[in-house]
Image: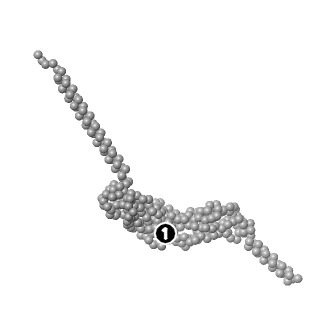
Amino acid sequence: MALAAAAFGGQVLLLCALLLHLRPCSGNSNIQTAVNITWSSINFKTILEWEPKPSNYVYTVEIDGPRSDWMKTCVHTTQTECDVTYLLKNVRDTYTARILSDVPLRDNGDFDQVPYAISPDFIPYDQTLIGMPTIESFEQKKDFLKVVVEDPLTPYRFLNSSFKSIRDLFRGDLEYTLYYWKDKSTGRKEAKTRTNEFKVSIDKGKSYCFYVQATILSRTENRKGEKSFDRCTHGDVPSDDFELEAILVIGAAAVGVFILFVISCVVAYKCKKAKAAAKEKENVPLNA
């Protein structure tokens, strides 16, 4: 009898322990952990995204890196994305995200542990995509084409609050390639530089089109960035100044026409005046 009671007591204790262990999920069976966690990053602006959309629960994001442990952001959010840019300032470090699924007004003693999901690792320096560069200026003079590129900016700032560019972070690892060709031609040439300026030889008087693309030399994946918009020249005249020059030419022609008109009016007036004077002289009677 004592053995049976002891066995029964043991079963009760085991059942209680099992129920205690299951209690966090028993009242919150609709809570789901995040899935399809991805890092979306362009020019070091980084957004963490995941699924599904929550119902009756919320998410909290934590970021872990070698210099800090589980930094919280987007606390109790109902969104399925979170801007984590400013937690990834050491761009060469490896980061991991933990997305917690939680009940907003949960008592601290309700769960032994909040359910969560872990993201893939992310290294901003190696994985952020490079956005479209801007053509700051270009000109075609005689037999050369000069192109100046503006580096894309990042969300990070210097101490003086000015934004850092991708060159400030990649330094000598950043290279630009200029692809250029004669207008309406399929033959394409290219030139490379680790500065922001190209100067290439071209055929004098011919129109050219071109675009620029960045490359991160140390990468094996995602090496090339987005292409800039195509730009075209008009012979020896930079396309940016073509319209202005046309206006100046038209204006000069208009001024010339106006000057000729004024001169013609003056000449006509003088001729008319001279004829009137001659006629008046003819009508004067001779003295007796």
Q: Residue at x 46, y 67 (%)?
A: 224
Q: Residue furthest right?
A: 1
Quadrant assignment, res 2: bottom right
Q: Residue at x 33, y 58 (%)?
A: 206
Q: Residue at x 27, y 36 (%)?
A: 262
Name the spot of residue 250 as percent of width and height, x first. Answer: 33, 45
Q: SS of the residue at dot 1?
A: loop
Tell me if 216 is positioned left or right of 262 in this view: right
Name the spot of residue 1 as percent of width and height, x first. Answer: 88, 82
Is residue 67 visible in this depiction of the protein? no
- Who is closer to the viewer here, 63 or 117? 117
Tell me if 215 is positioned left or right of 105 in this view: left
Q: Residue furthest left?
A: 288
Q: How many marks?
A: 1
Tell me the residue that label 1 is attached to: 222
Name the spot of residue 157 as percent of width and height, x first. Answer: 48, 62
- Who is closer to the viewer here, 192 or 275? 275
How many C-alpha atoms fall within 10 Å of the one at disc 1: few (<14), some, or many (≥20)?
few
Tell me if 48 is positioned left or right of 262 in this view: right
Quadrant assignment, res 190: bottom left
Is residue 234 visible in this depiction of the protein? yes
Looking at the rendered structure, the kind of residue marked 1 is Asn
Name the spot of residue 161 as percent of width and height, x first. Answer: 47, 60
Quadrant assignment, res 189: bottom left
In what quadrant of the picture does the C terminus appear?
top left
Q: Residue at x 34, y 50 (%)?
A: 245
- Looking at the image, is 242 positioned above or below residue 70? above
